[in-house]
Image (tube, rainbow, N blue to C red):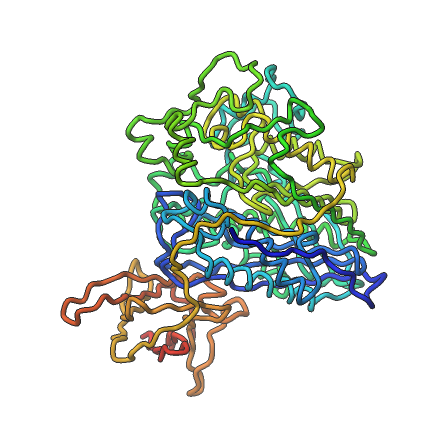
Amino acid sequence: MSTFVIPQSPSLPGQEGTSIAGASVVDITPHFGLPMAGYSTMSKSGEGRRGRLNARCLYLHEDAKRRVALCVIDQMSASRYLLAKVAQKTRATCGLSVDCIVLAGTHTHKAPGNYYGNPLYDALGQNSIGFDQEYADWLAERIASCIDAAVINARPASVGYAAAPLWGVSRNRSFPAFLKNLGCTKAKGPTAAAPPWLPQQIDPHTAIDPRVRVVAAYEAGSENLIGALATFGCHATTIPHKAPMYSADWMGDAQPFLRQEHKRAVIAIGASGGGDVTAFDEDHANSTRYFERSRQVGQRVAGAILAAIEAIKVTAQRPITIDCRFNEMDLGNKRVGNLTYTELAKHFAFGVPTLGGSEESRSSFDRWGCSFEGRTSLTDCRLDKPQIPKVRAFGQLQGELARLLRLQPSLHWPLHSVSISGTRIVTVPGEPTMWAAWQIENTCRVNGDEHVMPLGWAGDYSGYFTTECEYLAQHYEGSSTLWGRYSTNHLAKHLKMVSQRQIQAKLPGQAQFNIQHTESNFSPNYPPIESAMLQPNMGSRFGKPRLSWYMPQSARYVPGGQWFVRLEVQRNGKWTPLLVDGVPFDDINHEIVVSRDLINDTDLGIVRCLWHAEFSRPASNGSLRAHVRKGTEFPGLTLRLV
């Protein structure tokens, strides 16, 4: 059992009556070889990267007692361990603690796992079992440094909210379950009316939430954007599990288009209600053009974000007002207010359809015919048992395996309800479907004209959240709703009470984690590399220049926010960075894919890595060279492009 204290944020003297905002971005890309989370046992280890993984933070400050850091990381989700560990670090540096730090993941399936701090998802979230303490603590340190930098960068600001519609880039992957929300008569608790944006003729491409929603901060008295938090409900799974590389998916592909308009601003993109929404086309299983698809989605979302930011420019308000409410929900309390329609199951459980995987990542069980979408135990679901009509995967054996292996999700959910100048952000510790997020939004609206933005994959990860009607359908999302048919009712009711101050905001005195440690695969250190082993050469692949060189298998390079491959141009006898769109052409600012292949060199009796860097050759009037930077023990290399 791991335990550490989470103190409450103190007041900071000398900052009363100010409205300031700051933003920051920090690289959280680790070295290759870590198992990636999101596709469970079908996940691969990261043997390459396309772009970088980042943490982005928007810090807003009304006065010393009313402030909040909104932080989004390119990971499958936040975790309670990360949130607690980050808060422990920022409490000592900038005075921010868990009550005013909102931490969410982009839900990319192309980032490492084993950082959850609970045995269930540290075992099932990726293809390796256990908690990687070294990686989790390194990640927490990087996230904390991002928040610290945003606080330091804060300056007088105004803030506003706007939304822009976006159709045509996503679709509902669980459409039959979605349709159960229309005219459902078996739900016991209150359900949200149909969203106003739904057309009369509904199909999978319109059964989504089209709103790209943005909270943005501008420098006071100017049109300079400081930073923003945007949300859109769509899975970050355009890059399939067969591609073994780190990537921020379409959310990362949106960033270059955002930087073209706002070069100095930091724009974080989080996920709202997208548990049943995907950016894939119907033929995604056979598609090989997933990078192109990711760029298309990223560009379209970026366009909607920019439209919303432009609208905020003329409506941003000052002073900034902040009301940050926090409560850690204890799942030992099975009902909220003793209401039967909020009752959680006594034990968590996965249904049979979970074994088959989601639509974009069908598992071997599905191919063997061992899993069926919509499989239920009863046709009449009026029994007052929260897990009815779920058919447990592996039957009674599931519970026995969970006890034997001590598998358990988090039993405490950190929840935030943050009102920012009339816009309320509420956190969901998992994957809300579109309609479940809409139900939470309607439930948590304190004032009739208030904007409510559910932020998914925030605070922690505890599987899916579906409406009761969707749960009864028992498709993949419903069968993966761990605590039964009333899970969303329970969460929405609790969040409403937090938002309305019916529950006393509280902080846990101690955070306890039942961690099952594993040997760490992560190390931020560089091993010695002999320059004689590099053997650099150049070629081409698919018409793109390709650099390659050898390094030992143990070679690890942690980017740490620095470029690794950069193109340089020779002019007047001098080599200078090649600028494209006003920024250096390197693996931070442009699409340079860096990857490695493990090769068993029997002649030398070692296993080496063949590293590759591949990119589209930019137009240039001078001679080009590709430079690979030197690391602590890495001599680097330089190759001419002829």
The answer to which image quadrant residue 55 occupies is bottom right
The answer to which image quadrant residue 487 occupies is top right
The percent position of residue 302, horizontal first and vertical second, equals 57, 51
Would you place residue 118 above or below residue 65 in this image? Answer: above
In the picture provided, is 249 more to the left or to the right than 414? left
**For this rendering, which residue is in front, 445 or 414?**
414
Farthest residue toward the bottom?
A: 573
In the picture provided, is 434 more to the left or to the right than 125? right
The percent position of residue 459, horizontal first and vertical second, equals 60, 47
**For this rendering, which residue is in front, 90 or 559?**
90
Residue at image location 55% in from the left, 52% down from the top: 81
In the picture provided, is 187 more to the left or to the right than 238? right
Farthest residue toward the left?
A: 603
The percent position of residue 149, horizontal first and vertical second, equals 64, 67
Farthest residue toward the right?
A: 17
Examine the rendering and report whether any part of residue 106 can be seen: no
Would you place residue 200 above or below residue 322 in this image? Answer: above
| Quarter of the image that includes the C terminus | bottom left
**For this rendering, which residue is in front, 261 or 437?**
437
The percent position of residue 451, horizontal first and vertical second, equals 73, 40
In the picture provided, is 610 more to the left or to the right than 41? left
Residue at image location 65% in from the left, 65% down from the top: 148
